[in-house]
Amino acid sequence: MMTEFSCHTWAFNDLTLPEALGTIARLGFRYVDIGSGASLNAARAAERPQAVAAEIKADLETFNLKLADLYLMLPRISIEAEDKRQADMNLFKALLPFATALGTPGITLSPGLIHPADDLDAQDRTVAALREMVKQAKAAGLPISVEPHLDSMAATPEAVLKLVQDVPGLEITLDWAHMICQGVRTKDVLPLLDHTRHVQVRQAARSKLQTPFDKGKLDVDEVLKTLAEANYNGVICIEYMKTVGWHGMVEVDAIAESAQLRDALRDARDRLALEIAGD
């Protein structure tokens, strides 16, 4: 089993992007997920796509890293305010030349900010926006997936499956921590795997979206076995974050926790490979 592991730059968004990439490389990773935000200015990337992509590609080459995914945080695609919703959609379209020049294997998006149940048009707005974004990305040759995350229009397995059904061509970036935090069992995650393009993991527990390794409920052996049985061939990204307090997210040492989870995943991969070879 040759599963590769990535590390997300959001774990180090207090650093510049080159500093974050250097830290990830020194941790022994050969793949990286890059997300918009503190260390990647989306507006600048949209205005100067070729130049910004060239800068990042040079840094990736310097640190011997390959890009596993690009996360563009554009959560306003679900909101009622037309100008703000359109602004995020326009920014996405403007970022496609950057994403193409960067050579990303795909793009992850938010499925939009959650709305009250009595906002009956929120689902329609989200679907319409994502259909247009998938169409634009397809024309650029880029796969698009949404992350089912808390406080979004697709927080649960059922909600994201409906979104995938309503938006042809849309895939899933599955963050296991958001499932664990909600108490979603592995058997209820299985229906998502046929649509999963990318996977993110970190230690989490019920009502705690991020925990230290020894307090978490992520079973790395179960995750890898589940993904292998689903014939998932993509990269698995270790994604620690600094949004402390969000759904019980605990502050952790990103370097130490990323390294510990990295080692646990590698060991689980080796055990699974031996098990498969024995069969």
Image (tube, helix red, strand yellow):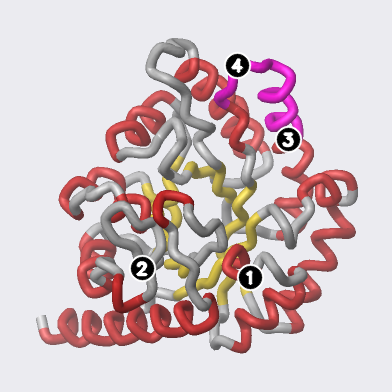
Quadrant including the C terminus = bottom left
Q: Nearer the viewer, mark 4 or mark 3?
A: 4
Above or below, comparing residue 274 to residue 162 in the picture: below
Residue, x 29% and y 40% (percent of image)? 157
Left or right, 66 with reference to 276: right
Determine which residue is flagged by label 2.
Answer: 203
Which region of the structure is painted magenta? Answer: 78-91
Determine which residue is flagged by label 4.
Answer: 80
Cα–Cα span, label 2 and label 1:
17 Å
For marks 1 and 4, the one nearer the N-term is 1
Q: Amino acid at mark 3?
A: Lys
Left or right, 154 with reference to 13: left
> Mark 2, residues whose alpha carbon is within 10 Å: few (<14), some, or many (≥20)?
many
Cα–Cα span, label 2 and label 3:
34 Å
> Mark 3, residues whose alpha carbon is within 10 Å: few (<14), some, or many (≥20)?
some
For the view shown, which residue lies furthest in the left direction?
A: 279
Q: Which mark is residue 93?
A: 3
Q: Amino acid at mark 2?
A: Gln
Q: Position of residue 159 (x, y in %)?
A: 34, 31
